[in-house]
Amino acid sequence: MVFDKDSADRSGPVQQCSSCGSTKTKHFSYLPIGPRIARIFGDENLAKLVQVHGPKYQNDSEVMWDIHDSQARKNIYSTDGYFKGDFRGLSFAFEADGVSPYHNVGVRYSMTPIMLTLLNLPRHIRNNFGNILLVRIIPGSNRSEASKLDPYIEIMVDELLYLTECSTVDTYRKAPVEIKIKLLVYILDYPGLSKLFCQHGSASLSGCHWCHIRGKFCKTLDKVIYLSNRSYLSAKDSLRMDTEHFVDKTPDQSVPPKKRQSSEENDYRTAYCRANKKVNRTLIAAATGYKSPYALGTLPGHCRLEESLPDAMHTIKDVVHNIMNLLVNKGVAIDKIQLTELNYGRNFYEKETAEQQAIACNGACTEMEHETTKDCVTTTRTEEMGCSTTAQKKMRRTQNPSVKPRCTYVLSSDDIKLADERACSLRVPLGFRLKPSPFIFKNRSALKSHDYKQIASHGILKYCLRGCLSERCRSSFFSLLDSISNICSESIQLDNLDEMEYNLNRSLALMERDFPVSLQNITTHIMHHIVKGIKQFGPIYGTWMFTFERFNSWICRRVFNKRHPETTVMETYTLFEWCNFMISTNIMPSEMKSLWCASEFNNQDDLEQEKDVGREVVLSKREMNSFHQAVNKDRKCLIV
């Protein structure tokens, strides 16, 4: 349980947590945000850097390069916005993502780092590991992540509310400044958003956090599917008039799902809290998708709908991963998928031509003429070899294969072999993370989120699958890959956003037409909201989770004590952040710089150029002792 100011005011000892009702106690470290903010304004160069972002990006450019060019950032720094035109206001991005520090040794344990990124800084500076503010690490519950985040988030919320009433000295302007903080955007994966904002997850009928779409539960697939891609198209689009290839078999005249509103969200959460019985609360949550109020809702100017966006990294990875699983018939229940399509009256098998039917008929007649002879020969051979009944049946199936039509969305064995050969023959530039390998079928388990993004957005999948599948399925899938490539652009033309959104919506409708409904899950539906997030917060390069996934890997390599992993990471990070600040402000003593440049703490990936770095340099025990002595000697420089 977390003992905060509310629990301290109560009379008597606290027996259980007020949020989750648990009686167990957990200890965790918390690094305050206030001293680090004062440290930024206490250095003239850093104070200037967090303020010059204002006038530089005031021009009405037609290209968005970063979140500084986005509409959300312009709104909060306008004269009528949250900061009232004061460019000294600090806007942060909130990140949280579960990580398993012992995955390489087979131990199941998960913890959740809470991070803040200062959006006033340029992207290549704020994504540096030393500039990511690690606030705390939420300990896991046995083998899983913490079920609720509010008890841990409340402490940070209390500090943010306290800091809004404080002031410090701005060494750049040589004048006092009132601290103003705004959490501008929340960057989490979909399960993380559900936990943070107390909403239903991806398996519910009301699984979308941004619109009122209602899913359908498919008993055969045992999952919720969303079949409303055509509602995002224009009224005169030809796909709306298709009455043959879609599930409903009728012209579509629906409108896009209604957007969620903040006022109704507050009403639903209030109704959830007022419900006396658990059954009533369950019904309200199932109908609306909302649960109880959350801790971040008490921050001034907070609006979940305007400050949260879909995570493009995991969304693109999951969509491409699911399609590739279906193409190679790996990890999917193909029998259930085919049965579902038959129930919906759709047939994805290729029609045989007259020549193919004649060949199949001649083959069947030949098999009937020689059936008796083959059976006798097979029986004699198996008796001589001592084969079992199972082996005999297997030999007969091999000798008399059944003629089956080809499924349009599944690659044949020859196509898979050809695609893997093309994947092995790739020639990638220096620094490209994806390595040539048979990743279409054989080595696909080794692909990471960044690899899926690269094969989808760089034309690699289009090259590997060229000439494979049916023409219609291949055209629809390539259309989706082109839309993903446009989404992943480092810069976005404002005039092209509407066209980009329309092409993405149409490619998703084509995927619904030419592929099974098993692909139409909540992740595929979230693709409709990605372009809206780009309009609000700029290119996904500034808001995706690749930076924080790599920072989580850095955290995992700093777990030196398996009994207290969170504490050891926080202690290591404190030293790491302090040294980065000392170097950036030229305060670090000269005898420490050589040790720091060669230490493993300073080793991190190059986030902008996406290049691998060399091996880590581990200092000797004597060097580490001298390093810590120098840190303790000059720790007074940390105080501003």
Image (spheres, rainbow, N blue to C red):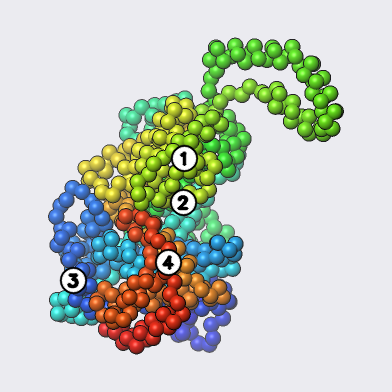
Q: Nearer the viewer, mark 2 or mark 4?
A: 4
Across and down, in percent, residue 545 comes to 39, 57
Across and down, in percent, residue 5 comes to 43, 82
- Identify the mark at residue 48; answer none if there is no mark: 3
Please name the amino acid that badge 2 sits on.
Lys
Q: Image point 45% across, 36% down: which residue?
A: 422
- Identify the mark at residue 424; answer none if there is no mark: 1
Of residues 95 and 422, which is closer to you in this image? 422
Q: Quick one: label 3, few (<14), some, or many (20+) residues within 10 Å?
A: some
The vertical placement of 116 against 521, above or below, is below
Give the Cα distance between marks 1 and 4: 30 Å
Secondary structure beneath label 4: loop
Q: Is residue 142 left or right of residue 531?
A: right
Residue linked to disc 4: 616
Query: Of callouts 2 and 4, which one flags the residue occurring earlier in the amino acid sequence?
Result: 2
Q: Is residue 57 left or right of residue 304?
A: left
